[in-house]
Structure formats: C-alpha cells, structure tokens
Image (cartoon, helix red, strand yellow):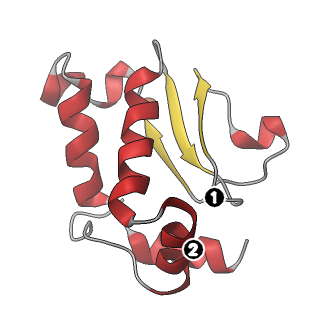
C-alpha cells in the first residue's frame, strides 16, 4: 500500500485481470464480495495464479500451496475498527485508494 496510490493497474497485470474478469471493475467487485463474505478475522488475497481467495486468521496462500500472493487485504477488525468502526464495507471500498499497483505488477511479472 502507498498513500499516493490507488487508481487502476496498467500493463501486463491489467491485461491479465481484464482477460480473466472481463473488466477491472468486475475484478474489484469479486474481491470486495469475497472480503465482505469472510466471517470473522482473516485476509483476502490475489494469488500469483490470479485467484481471489480468503483465508481465516493468520493463514496464507503459501499454506495452501498457492505460492506467495500478489497482494492481500487485511480484514481483521484491528485493521479498520479505529477508523471505520464496524463498517467493513466502507474500509474495503477505501482500501482500493492505497493499493500500490506498481508493486503488485512487479510481483506479477516476477512470480
Ligand atoms: Fe492486521
């Protein structure tokens, strides 16, 4: 994450996301829906194979044999409670404003 980030990805990663989901917005919609559906504490991940998965608590994609993820969203309550109280949906929507796509794309290219 980065304070001067957000927006939409470009380059190879953008092409791959659009090829898989049809549009960047569709990708975001699925990522958000899975993040909201995660019960309790955990993480939402974009894996190196461009799967969106959630894991409970401190579990990671590596534990599932899916390699190091490209990015992860912390949906433990401590990640958002001070700023958003119980409004996980607001936190998830705002989180996209700090996603560092240059970093994520580097990880995608070097996976
Ligand atoms: Fe956390």
Label 1's element? loop
Quadrant of residue 91 within the rendered picture? top left
**Where ligand 1 lies, by quadrant?**
top left
Badge 2: how crowded within 10 Å, few (<14), some, or many (20+)? some
Task: Name the residue rendered at 57%, 78% in the picture.
Answer: 106
Please determine whether, in this image, residue 100 is positioned above or below residue 98: below
Q: Which mark is residue 106?
A: none
Question: Which residue occupies the foreground of this view, 4 or 94?
Answer: 94
Q: Which residue is mark 2?
A: 16
**Residue 99 shown left or right of residue 3 in the figure:** right
Task: Name the residue rendered at 50%, 60% in the picture.
Answer: 21
Q: How many marks?
A: 2
Image quadrant occupied by the C terminus:
bottom right
Q: Residue furthest right?
A: 65
Marks 1 and 2, Cα distance to the nearest angstrom? 8 Å
Badge 1: how crowded within 10 Å, few (<14), some, or many (20+)? some
The mark that comes first in sequence, 1 or 2, is 2
Ligand 1 is within 8 Å of the C-beta of the residue at disc 1:
no
Q: Residue furthest top?
A: 40
Image quadrant occupied by the N terminus:
bottom left
Q: Are marks 1 and 2 in contact (CB under 8 Å)?
A: yes
Q: Position of residue 55 (x, y in %)?
A: 62, 28
Quadrant of residue 97 within the rendered picture? bottom left
Task: Name the residue rendered at 43%, 36% in the picture.
Answer: 74
Label 2's element? helix
Quadrant of residue 33 within the rendered picture? top left
Q: Which mark is residue 50?
A: 1
């Amino acid at each position: 994450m980065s304070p001067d980030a957000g927006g939409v990805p470009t380059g190879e990663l953008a092409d791959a996301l659009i090829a898989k989901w049809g549009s960047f917005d569709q990708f975001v919609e699925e990522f958000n829906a899975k993040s909201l559906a995660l019960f309790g504490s955990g993480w939402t991940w974009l894996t190196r194979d461009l799967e969106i998965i959630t894991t409970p608590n401190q579990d990671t994609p590596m534990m599932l044999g899916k390699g190091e993820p490209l990015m992860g969203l912390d949906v433990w309550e401590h990640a958002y409670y001070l700023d958003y109280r119980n409004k996980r949906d607001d936190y998830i929507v705002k989180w996209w404003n700090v996603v560092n796509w240059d970093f994520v794309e580097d990880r995608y290219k070097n996976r």
